[in-house]
Amino acid sequence: MIDKINNVKKQALTELSSLRSTAELRNWQIKYLGRKGELAAVMQLVKASSIEQRPRLGKLANELKVDLENAFTQKNISNNKELDEFFDVTLPGIKPARGHYHPITIVQKELEDLFRSMGFMVLDGPELESEYYNFEALNIPSWHPARDIQDTFYIKEKKPISGNRMLLRTHTSSVQVRALEKYGAPLRAVVPGKVFRYEATDASHDNTFWHLEGLVVAEGITVAHLIGVMNELLKGIFKKEVEIRLRPGYFPFVEPGFELDVKCFICGGKGCSVCKQSGWVELMPCGLVHPNVLKAGGVNPEKFSGFAFGLGLSRLVMMKYQIDDIRLFLSGDLRFLEQF
């Protein structure tokens, strides 16, 4: 038994002295110090020995354990030191992490390029908007029931201006009248941006999302022009023909008004949580600009007509990349964002 212990020690130290790689050291550790290794086998033999021999053999086995563990630790330290001191100057450098565009920004830039190619201006407006431009100038007076369609974040002011409270804009449509006041008619413009609504969140709704308003005002504008631009928009962003449908919809700032839906890209029209099992996703309200909106912008509705549309940019991105939950956009989850 004593010879067995000495032989294990001699063999283990001889093998250890010739090891170089981390993998070899790991294999040696398992072979000799592991739960089923040589040291464990020696301990079992000591346990099975006679009562008279057990004290002496136990002492030798414990010394063997200490010697092997110390030798392994020193070898490991020495091996790591050699690796640390070695530097291969021919290896490529570590590439620094770089940021990239958010998926909504990617699609927004594609849309801006697309609309510019059709002669549209890309405009911006304030996120903190007045009640006049957000509602009243768009033919939604304070007493109108359409106000209930958009639950709103109003701002508390120490001295609010009577009848013109401030709020977080509920759509970028608020820039319609601002643009008409500044540029007049004819006018072609789109307004992308973040908007806010006080509503419950689910897979296809959030209280903060992105919207893109489009406005065309000129002489002789009809619904045919609206449909033509919508087809170009969807074909340009999805790179293929997209199945759409128009259905009547009520929006105070257009008359007539429509809802434009696209067949759900997530389920292919079969029904899912995004399309609420209908197979269609409401993408944008649209229609011919109401005469009252033209008047608010200082444009003569007897001479000019136009169309407007409000594109749910967040939902469009969901369709393009087949994202099944709108809340991912603002989650800050790098596992999601690094896919783009």
Image (spheres, helix red, strand yellow):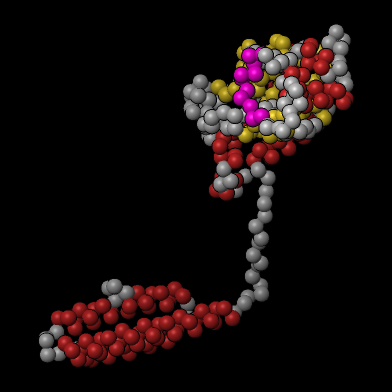
Residue 251: where, in percent of width, then height?
A: 67, 15
In the image, 302: left or right of 318?
Answer: right
Asked where in the image residue 33 lies, by quadrant, the reply is bottom left
Residue 156: where, in percent of width, then height?
A: 68, 32
Considering only vertical position in the picture, is 278 above or below 198?
A: above
Residue 290: where, in percent of width, then height?
A: 76, 13
Front residue of 269/204: it is 204
Considering only vertical position in the picture, is 167 above or below 11?
A: above
The residue sitting at 78% across, 16% down in the picture is 293
Residue lying farthest to the front in this orientation: 159
Q: Quadrant of the N terminus?
A: bottom left
In the image, 49: left or right of 320?
Answer: left
Asked where in the image residue 194 lies, by quadrant, the reply is top right
Considering only vertical position in the picture, is 162 above or below 116?
A: above
Q: Note whether residue 67 is visible.
A: yes
Q: Quadrant of the C terminus?
A: top right
Front residue of 110/236: it is 110
The residue sitting at 74% across, 21% down in the picture is 163
Residue 268: where, in percent of width, then height?
A: 53, 26
The residue sitting at 59% across, 29% down in the picture is 198
Q: Which residues are magenta?
A: 144-154
